[in-house]
Amino acid sequence: MEALAKISAQSNFGPLDWAIVIVYLIGSVGIGFYVRRYIADMADYVVAGRSLRTYLGLATMIGTEMGLVTVMYNAQKGFTGGFAAFHIAVVAGVVTLIVGLTGFIVVPLRRAGVMTIPEYYQQRFSPGVRVVGALILALSGILNMGMFLKAGALFVTGVTGMTDPMTLKLVMTILITLVVIYTILGGMVSVVVTDYVQFVVLSIAILLTTGFALDRFGWDAMVQTVNQYRGEGGFNPFHEGGFGTGYVIWMGLLGLVVSTIWPTAVMRACAADSTRTVRKIYIWSSIGFVIRCLIPFFWGICALVFVSRHAELKALLLPTEGKADAQHTLIAMPMALSVTLPTGVLGLLTAGMLAAFMSTHDSYLLCWSSVLTQDVLGPVMGERLTTRTRLLFARLIILLTGLFLLLWGLWYPLGQDLWDYLAITGAVYFTGAFAVLIFGIYWKRASTAGAYGALVCGFGAILGLTPLQEAIGIDVSTEWVGISTVVAAVVVMIVGSLLLPDKKGPAAIEAAAKEA
């Protein structure tokens, strides 16, 4: 830790940078107060009145998915995996493009007129499936967010040179407070507006940062360093000394899930003004999905070069035996940039990253609160849940979720790369949802019993968490836990549907789609 403190003390972050960051934060909270006047009902709060057109939808889609946590976990993958990590970006872009061209899953959901995925569960299967699916979705999603806050705080403390543990906790508290305030006030309208601002600010910051990093470290040095410390596995993603074939397959499944099933992306599809716009958003977002991975991978490799040039850091982050602590490799990228970028550019980058942090958090907080309000409380309370009560519950859930994120981020021991943590916690939801949505949309014989079984299978994914594996004495790679859970959910969905078919079939969803 002394090595980290020594390097962090050399940060170029100065008064000008602080001024840029503070002005941006004040402006973001101001947006929340300003757009509050446009919130009349849950449709405005959750899907912005279904008014998104192509360009604004594209900006808000990329704005949300290019979050600070995205930059942090991708930079960490670049640091630990080298150029081989680029396969994640390529897979994500290709899969998203295919979804845009075919309309796979997202277009039928938009035609159904739903605001959330569990709402579709009720149309296609039953209210019970909706409630169970919503609870699993919210549990998985909130758990998935558990490390977002810490990752954001690590970036801020790393780039500003504030390495004291108490400072980290203070930064986490301030960040989550700001996000909760303006998300509660503005809902999806606030999300869309801040996403657009973030898209502009972050684009400029990313271009400047990448140019300075390339000039400082050089392409040849990056290639040589990856070859020295990561070997063939740093270039070939299929090499078993690096990611391996199983991991590449797992990334293909994740790419499909993120673009079609992950709720924050689906909310953009549901908020689009037409199915044609949905397709356009996904087609053009495929480019953004590639870029959002490639650039942080590049920054992570630059951080690897930076660390290799400092003996104290090498001992901590590039140990000759065993693996470096995941929290330490997370901070490598912001620490490297803090002494590489000049004052002013650092402030712009930090403002852009904070914009990305807030954009991702507001979208996710809104998503999970909407799911719990619309898909759990709604079916249970029925007509007693008025529009005013729905908005009140949604805002209360956002507040409680923010408190959980603060507590979880403070004490949970990560134990693995952040991306792998996110993938496995997300799998608690999406492994079952993958089977339920695909078979529900494209197979008329899919039944309620099969849907219940597939959703429950997702809980098997938690075996991929490193602290849990250490506690029960097993050692199974994240990718094989995830792939096995996906296969189990598909098998259970098929077998359950064949053995326990529904009597009425999917007529309800077809009628609902026509009415929408």
Image (cartoon, rainbow, N blue to C red):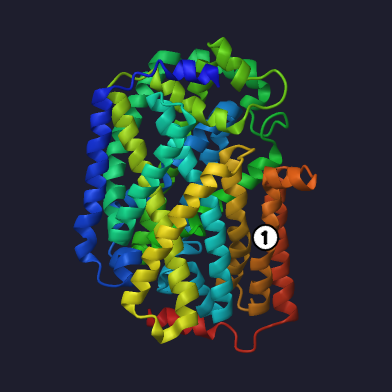
- Which residue is nearer to you in this view: 393 or 134? 393
**Whole-percent x and y of residue 186?**
28, 59
Quarter of the image holding residue 275? bottom left
For the residue pair 477 and 326, the one nearer the viewer reads as 326
Residue 357: image location, x then y, percent: 39, 43
Residue at image point 37% right, 73% down? 390
Position of residue 75 relative to residue 270, above or below, is above
User: Going 31% across and 18% down the picture, which residue do you hit?
Assistant: 342
Question: Which quadrant of the rendered structure holds the C terminus?
Answer: bottom left
Which quadrant: the N terminus?
top right
In-front residue for pair 498/483: 483
Residue that numbered label 1 is attached to:
459
Q: Is residue 109 left or right of residue 203?
A: right
Residue 245 found in image quarter: top right
**Residue in the image at 64% along x and 38% along y:** 415
Please identify the residue farthest to the front as the structure is shown: 166
Question: Which residue type does callout 1 highlight?
Answer: Phe
Q: Residues within 10 Å of mark 1 (few under 14, many from 20)?
A: some
Element assignment for label 1: helix
Residue at the far bottom: name it. Answer: 503
Residue 482 locus on image (x, y percent): 67, 51
Is 153 positioned to the left or the right of 487 in the image?
left
How many labels sit on residues? 1
The reply to whether residue 291 is visible in this rendering is no
Seen in the picture, residue 244 relative to 370 is either above or below; the reply is above
- Decide: is 36 above or below 16: below
Q: Tell me what residue is drawn at x 45 percent, y 21 percent.
A: 336
Kindly tell me whether residue 358 is visible in this rendering: yes
Relative to the observer, which residue lies in front, 393 or 237? Answer: 393
